Structures are given as C-alpha cells and as structure tokens.
Image (cartoon, coloured by chain):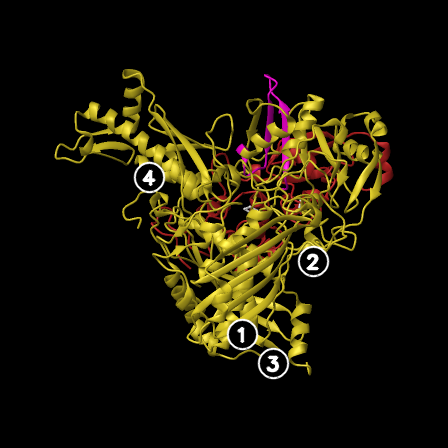
Chain colours: A red, B yellow
Amino acid sequence: MRGTSGVLIMKTMQLRLTVNGETRQWTIAPGDLLLDVLRREGCYGVKRGCEKGECGACTVLLDGKPINSCLMFAAQAEGCDILTIEGLAVGDVLDPLQEAFLDHGAVQCGYCTPGMILNAKALLARNPHPSEAEVRETMAGNYCRCTGYLKPVEAVLAAAGRAPAPARSGRKAVKR
Amino acid sequence: MSGDRAVVGQNLRKVDGVKLVTGRPAFTDDIHLPGMLIGKILPSPHAHARIKRIDTGKARALPGVHAVLTYKDVPRVPHTTAGQAWPEPSPYDTYLLDNKVRFVGDRVAAVAAETRAIAEKALRLIEVEYEVLPAVLEIEQAMASGVAVIHDEPDSTKIFDREHNIAGYILREIGNVEEGFRASDLIFEREFRTGRQQHCPLEPHVAIAWLDADQRLVIRTSTQVPYHARRQVAMILQIPVSRVHVIKPRIGGGFGGKQEMLLEDITGALALATKRPVKIEFTREEEFYMARSRHPQILRMKMGVKRDGTIVASQLTVLATTGAYGSHSTTVQGNTGSKVLPLYRAEHMRFECHVVYTNTPVAGAFRGYGCPQGFFAQETLVDEIAEELGRDPVEFRRQNMIRLGDIDKLSAQLGEGKEGLPRHIRSCGLPECLDRAAAAVDWDGKRNAAGGPAHLKRGVGMAATMQGSGIAGVDWASAFLKMNEDGSFFLQVGAADVGAGADTVLAQIAAETLGVSLDKVVITSGDTDITPFDVGAYASSTTIISGGAVRKAAEKVRAHVLDMAAKMLDAPVDKLECGDNQVYTICECRKAVSMAELAMHAMYKEKTQIMDGASHFNTDSPPPFCVTFAEVEVDTETGKVRVLHLVTAVDPGTAINPMQAEGQVEGAVAQGLGYALIEELLLDGQGRPRNASFLDYKIFSAKDMPRLTTILVETDEPLGPFGAKSISEVPINGPAPAIANAIYHAVGIRLRKLPIRPEDVLRELREKLPTL
Ligand code: FES
Ligand code: FES
C-alpha cells in the first residue's frame, strides 16, 4: 500500500473498513489521507490543524489506538475499525469524558476537543485510573491554544473518577 | 455581587458545548458544497520585489483550473485588512493583489481549481519575473535615509511618512516629564526587546465563498469581525454591502489573528470569477507567515522616583514594526502607552512611538494588543527600582498603583488612533488581587528563602497589569430578542464567539434579565443577514459592550412581557416579577403565568410578537486588573528556566460564568508563558520564515505546563452588565515580566529580551559570574 509505484498506476480503489460501528466501503485514491477521506465522508469532527502529525487535532482511534489521521493513507486503514468523535456517544447519551469536558469548562473553541477526548478515551481504556502526570504525558500530543490544559486535564481525571465534578449550578467555581 | 441571581454568576455549561464535544459539523470547513473549488495563493518568495512580468497562460491551461487572478484582473482599492470600526485608523496600504510584493508570503496571484493538487500545480505553472528590491528587515534600519521605501505607491493613504517607512507616529504627554525627572531623586532607564509571536489558533484561517440563488456573495469564514469583513469586502470587490452575506460559524480560536479581513476578499474574488463555491484554507505553514503576528518592539523605559518610593515621572519610547503592512499599527502601539503607563500614578507621563514598515510578516491584533510588550518593560523596570530602593516589589506597587476614584488622563489623549476619553476607575480589585495572589504563591516565605541544589536556583517574581473593556466611544453592539410559543427566546447578536464563550455569557445575561433558565435562550451570533450589527470580538469588548446591548434589549422585552402579564393576571406591572420561567405577582394574591402560556396568549390572542432590540456603547473603558506571580527554577548549568507555578489573580468585575472566566485566564496565561520563554517566529537573512511549523516553533503542551492557580477577585463595575468588565486579554500581560523578575530573584540577572532563551540566561550568568 505504501509503495509509491502502485499509487501512480492505480487511479481509484475500494476501501473497506468499520467506522463508528458501521461497515463502510468507500472509493478512494491510493494517495488520499485518512483525514481527508473521513472528513469527505462526513466525519467532520476529525479536525485539520497541521497535517504533519504535530497537533493531534485529527486524532481518531484505529483498532482502539489513537493515531494522527493526517499521517496515514486511507488505504492503510483497510479492514480496520475506526472510532471518530461522532461515534463516541451512544445515541444521545454522552460518554463520561464528553460530560466531564462540559462540566469542567474544558471546551473553549472546541477545535482540539475531539482529538483530546479520543486520546483520553484510549488512555482510560488501558489505564482506567491514570495519575495527573500520566494524563499530561498522554495529552502532550494534543495541542490546545485556548485552555492552558488545566481544565481538560481535570476533566479527564474526573471522568476517571480521580477528581470531583464541580457543582453544575453551584454559585461559584471552585477557586484554586 | 451576584446575590440571588439564578443564571449570572453560575458555572453553567457552554450553550454550544454539546455540538463541540460530539464533533458535529459546526466550523467553517465543516460543510461541503457541490462543485466547490479549492483556492490557493501564490506567496512571494522575495521580501521585497516588483513583479516585472507575470504569465498565467500555462496555469490557466491546466485542466481543472477555473481561475487565475493577478493584479491585472482585480480592482485596485487601497484598504487595510485590520478589522476595525469605520473609518479604520490603520493606513490604507494594502491591495487585493498588487504588482509589488513586500514580504516573503505576500500575495502574488491566486488560483481556483477542482482539487488542491491541481491548484498547487497551477501555482507552480505561474511564471513570474521579479525585479528584486533591497529588503528592509531590521527594525532599526527602517527609518534610515537611503533605505528602500516599502510603500512607494502613490495611492496608499494615512501613512505617516512613507519616505522613511513610518506607518504611524504617536507622541503624547501629560504633565512635563523633563520637569518630573528633575524633581526625582533617582532615575532609571533601560531598553527592552520583544519578539514576533504568532497566534497559532488550532483552526487556521479558512473562508468559503459562493453565490447564492440571488447571486449574492456569501462568505462563510473564520472571523472575529463579520460586519467589518462584510464592509471591507464590499469596498474591495466594489459591490454593494447588501450583496454580501458574511457567516461566522464556530471558530477554532482567534486571539486577534482573525480580527482581520484576511481571506474573505480573495476567496470572494475567486467565487465571483468562477461562479463556483471556492474555499481557501491556510496550511499551518501559511498560517505562520502569511497570517498575522504580534508586533516586535524595542522599548526604552525611563522612570523617575523619589526616595520615599513615589513614582514621579514615567516615559516610554517605542520603536515597533508592523511588518509589510500597517494593520493595527498605531492602535496596537497606542495601547502600549495608554494601557500601561497609567497603572502607576506618576504625575508626568510621556509616550512616544514610531511604527515602521519592514519587509517582514505582517503584525496585527493579538490578545493583549500592545500591552504584553509595554508591561514587560514597565514591570521589569519597576521591579528593579523596588530592589534599588530596598522595597518589597508588592509594597512598592501598592504605594504607586492606580486606585478607585482615579482618573487616567493619558487615555484621554491616546484613543483609538485619535484623541481618546479619560478613564474613570469605578471598580478596582487590585489590592485584593495582590493580597490573594501573594498568599497563594507564599510570597513572604519564598522571597526570603534561598533555596535549591547548587545549580538549580529558585525564585519568585510578580507583575501587575491592566487592560480595557472595549474601546471607549468607538465600540458598539446591538442585540435583538423575540419570544417563541414555548416561552423561549431567540437572541440575535452580531457579536462573534470565537471560542471564548461569548454566546454563553450573552445568553446568560439575557436569561437572567428575563427570569428564564439558560436553555430558554437560543442564540444566533455573527451572521450579517440575520443578526444586528456588532463591531466583533476584540478589545475585550464582548461582555461589556455586546453584553450591555443584550441587557438593554432584554430589559425592553421584559417590559413587554410584564405588560402582557399585567393584562393576563389583572395586576399592576409594579407588582410583577419575572423568574423561574414565569411571571408572578409579588403581592398577597400569588398569581402566576408561565412564560409559555404568556407567549401563546400574546401570539394567538393579542396577535403580538413580543420582541425588541437595542444598541449599546460606552464612553469609558473600565480596566480589568490583574496580578501575576511566578515561581521559577533556573538551571545555572544549562540556562534553562522551568516555571513551577503561575498564580493569576484577576478583577474582571462580575464573572458572568466563573468557570469560563477561569478558562480565559488559564488560556491567556499559557500564551503569555509561551511569549515569555519559547515563542518567536524567526526569519532568515532573506526574510524567509525559519520555523513555520508547530514542530519548530513550539507552543506549550499539557506536559510542560506549570501548575496554574487562578483567583477571581470580583468587583462591581457600574458600566458593565451585572457589574462585568472583561477578562480574556489582561492575564496574558503578566507572565513575561513576572518570570523575568523571578529569574532575577533566583540568580540575580535581568533579562530584557523576549523570549527569554536558555542561551541568553547563560550569557548573562557568565557575565555576572565569570567563573561559571
Ligand atoms: S492535523 Fe494531524 S496532527 Fe495536526
Ligand atoms: S479549545 Fe480551542 S484549541 Fe483547545
């Protein structure tokens, strides 16, 4: 798949994969980035921040592992199981991470948010009770220019049961 | 202050939060239009050149290319890209496309093609013959006689002195500083330098333009200033304002970089040329050098003090560069004086500034808007003065700082590119900010503790800063509200939420005023066809100015609601109250009608739409105040500075949503930290960017952030809705001087250049202790 000679000969190809629990078959060009194909197919929650693997905005889970979809050809995802942010909530029921991000004010512009949440999702799957340092280490790959990271880190810890959720309609924020 | 308020002052979830955490299509690029073309801009490879010949034949002939535009194909209308209220104070020195390029990255041509690959190939097929001109890259060279004139075109206007590359010049004085210095016991004077920081919004600039069924030009764009963009695009493309529709969807961060009409004009021109939808999206690399950045400055700060610690005179002389175009040139630099010097009550103040053109990337608005530079100089010098006088830096500031009841007269002289208005201090939480932040960092304990292992030295430092809340007499906004059958309200505002939470705050203000829960307010913002005018998201104006308009509109609608309820309940209006999604009597009879019942009655019995709107502006700009304390550890072997703790105490007036307010502080602090230590867009000897990627430029990540403590010191500002001022800009000013002062406390060296790099620290350390 990665060989460039093949890329030049083939014009289009069929890609079969599972996205957010549904089997999909898409016509792609061999050189298409996974990021571009996912967005083209309606997964707009996969964000483009740099296209160089440096910001994490395009993070999706590929067979449960976070990857930068801007660094991967779509063709490489043949037969894989992909989770994008659109597939995280179950119906209208948000994932605890999504709830925690809202409750902790961890979302500002929201552009980095899908990548952050998915990266955290994978972390909690392999380490349900991470320390703050572990959360920060994992999230180092997700740049955020809005929040200064404090509230996103708190949200992940809260979703992991490591930090109290702030009172939703308490009169005042918990002052630190 | 917020007493028994149900909505204002509460940590409510963002009104647009769910769609963001679920990744629903909400941003500019999250749509696909049939037949959409991809636009690309050919960037100049030269810092300064004239286009002698440009041949687009081959590019146009490439299959899949639908348009190639050069200066020959578009109207030549001098304008500024600064998204400011008309008439913009920035020079009109920019053209949609020109036959001269003035920085590496300047527009040479633009193409629209079926795919990005074809568009990129078309760019390579454009043949350009340049007459390369000598480039002015160094800020200190710009005014010298004999250097190249960057804006030699005759049709640009509002340039201060084009022959000497001076975009703007400012001189303001209150009192008489020379007299002040004569009356001082001690005089201090130092030079400071600041770097070119880039905004790095996670979403790069992107715009999509198309013609709707009525052939009106629709532009969906990542902007902070939809209304200014509409006006400017109409002027540049020479079509009526009524033929342009600007839509601001969710925005992936702006920080001032999107207070700029940057892609809307060229995307619109391509859409008009092709009659097809066209999208232009900056790559990250393009965002770094083709978008905007913070103005680099060289600052000379001079202060005269009495032995008792009274600051008598302060003078700031600035040489700044705006890069190749004068976007925000005099206004950013004006702030460097007007928002900075008056923090201390010197009787004599003088501010002088030259803003020069250089053949470098264009500077523009950036959170803090000139204040980070000014406060870096002032707060570092004040620290040095306190040290010389043997005074505690906190107490020295306390003695001199502005206080309740003061009038800042420098602001009266220095407005938005013209005379301004005096600032009256009607709310001031500075003393409490000092107390609480000092306690949080353990100032007294750590100031006196010498510590750390041999080569790791710890220190604490601090800085005090302020900002404004809107531009007095310039910024204005409007809001419109109408009631629906279910007792909910549609709130329409021109204000532009760029991720900082404006929609939520404005909806909270409406809900509180109307006595309904937040879910009963549905907000639409930043759509020039639907929402009324607003200058946009800048100058820390949204909460106080747009919020003021919302408050007024909601009060009018509330009056209509009460009138209706008075009829329905047969009770006098002054015995009625709104709350809990209903109107109830406050007399013995205890009658109530729900908002939903009331709305149905109004609409289908009285045949009346309950609705109203209002506009709002202020003639003053109440400053939010901020105090930043930093604890650092300096490695004397490597020069590396590690920030351990940053404490920020802010007086934002009332925090309409404290959780969001804290988020604004933390985000600003992270950017201020980057500005202090690592962030700088570097250019090579030809003016080409050297680090135009995240990998090379680097911003702070979750892993390298220090501990952050945020303290909100709420006050009640009479001019703000529910007592609110502003918060999002002021905390960015403090980290750099606080860190520089902490480094001094740790190892005894003064760093006066930003960013503070390990090599600078090492060099200073070696100078101080040659044995190291
Ligand atoms: S867009 Fe993939 S890492 Fe930035
Ligand atoms: S919330 Fe805006 S980039 Fe993270």
Per the rendered image, the range of residues in magenta is: B204-227
Label 3: which secondary element:
loop
Q: Nearer the viewer, mark 1 or mark 4?
A: 1
Residue beneath disc 2: B140
Indicate left or right for B457 with B146 as reference.
left
Identify the residue shown where x is 78% and y is 55%. Answer: B685
Mark 3 vs 4, N-terminal side? 3
Local crowd size for mark 3, using a 10 Å CA cut-off: few (<14), some (14–19), many (≥20)? few
Give the quadrant of residue A6.
top right
* Tags 3 and 4 both on a single chain: yes
Residue beneath disc 3: B454
Image marks 4 and 2: residues in contact by CB distance under 8 Å = no
Mark 1 vs 4, N-terminal side? 4
* Tags 4 and 2 both on a single chain: yes
Indicate left or right for B574 with B716 as reference.
left
Mark 2 vs 3, N-terminal side? 2
Q: Tell me where residue B68 appears, x and y as whole percent.
A: 77, 28
Residue beneath disc 1: B745
Q: Nearer the viewer, mark 3 or mark 1?
A: 1
Q: Tell me where residue B592 appears, x and y as whole percent.
A: 21, 30
Q: Amino acid at mark 1?
A: His
Give the quadrant of residue B327.
top right
Q: Nearer the viewer, mark 4 or mark 2?
A: 2
Q: CA distance from mark 2 to mark 3?
A: 41 Å
